[in-house]
Amino acid sequence: MNRPFHATKFRTHFNARTIPRHPKIDELKKWCVDFHRFGLTPLHKHGACGNLSFRLSVGEIPFVITASGASFHETPRDDFFVKVNHCDIENMVVYAEGTREPSSESLLHFAVYRERKDVNAVFHGHCKPLLLQGPQLGLKETTREEPYGTVELVDSILEVLNQENFLLLKNHGFISLGRTMEDAGELALLMLHKVSPTITEMGKS
Ligand SMILES: [Zn+2]
């Protein structure tokens, strides 16, 4: 069977088929727009642009994440976002609320929130200059390339994550973590600025 190349590799169990509502979703929309503007969510070889999420309550799992296959080229609409209540990584099931499938990297976001109670925002993007130059700048990187949306990718991240807030995913992209969405977003832009000062200057205009 041919599956869309950005398809989720887990099964989604919908607890509700309604669009999630939360005041902070507007802030997430702003970061989706900014990530696109700064070129951090180009179409990746696996077909996804990127995926951004924030945790709803400190220390608890539920988070709001961009939908699978969401295009960052358009202004994000309300149905662009899905609430993930829980994930069963072992059985590859995501429990969610929304009208669309949650991001194919929902398991990755879940695992980071479970591992790092200090993190309330996880932004995942793709950026060639960062992949090429990041290691020389001392940025931490996973030790091996793993296919998107898999437990193997999650494991490769957890193995080296420790207290890092910025991590390169080998031959793939990066994750930027923060106590707030602003922390995660600004950190990604700071790293981008280190490898491509002109891109960030252009984006500010
Ligand atoms: Zn990716």
Image (tube, rainbow, N blue to C red):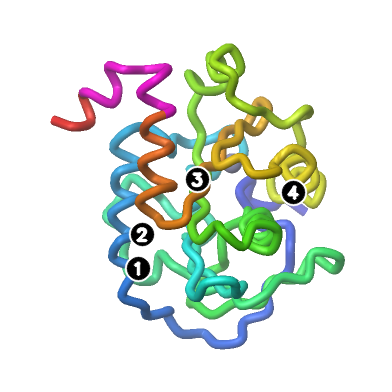
Residue corresponding to mark 2: 28
Q: Nearer the viewer, mark 4 or mark 3?
A: 4
Identified by mark 4, the residue type is: Val
Specify whether residue 192 is painted magenta: yes
The residue at label 3 has a CB less than 8 Å from ligand 1:
yes
Give the Cα separation between the discs numbered 2 and 3.
13 Å
Q: Residue at x 40, y 26 (%)?
A: 192
Q: Quadrant of ligand 1?
A: top right
What secondary structure characterizes most of the magenta part?
helix
Please identify the quadrant where the N terminus is shown: bottom right
Specify whether residue 34 is painted magenta: no
The residue at label 2 has a CB less than 8 Å from ligand 1:
no
| Contact between labelled residues 2 and 4, with CB atoms less than 8 Å apart | no
Give the Cα separation between the discs numbered 1 and 3.
17 Å
Q: Residues in magenta?
A: 191-201
Q: Position of residue 10 (x, y in %)?
A: 74, 63
Q: Position of residue 61 (x, y in %)?
A: 62, 72
Residue corresponding to mark 3: 50
Give the mark nearest the N terminus, 4 or 2: 2
Q: Which mark, residue 154? A: 4
Q: Is residue 123 above or below residue 29?
A: above
Identified by mark 2, the residue type is: Leu
Give the mark nearest the N terminus, 4 or 3: 3
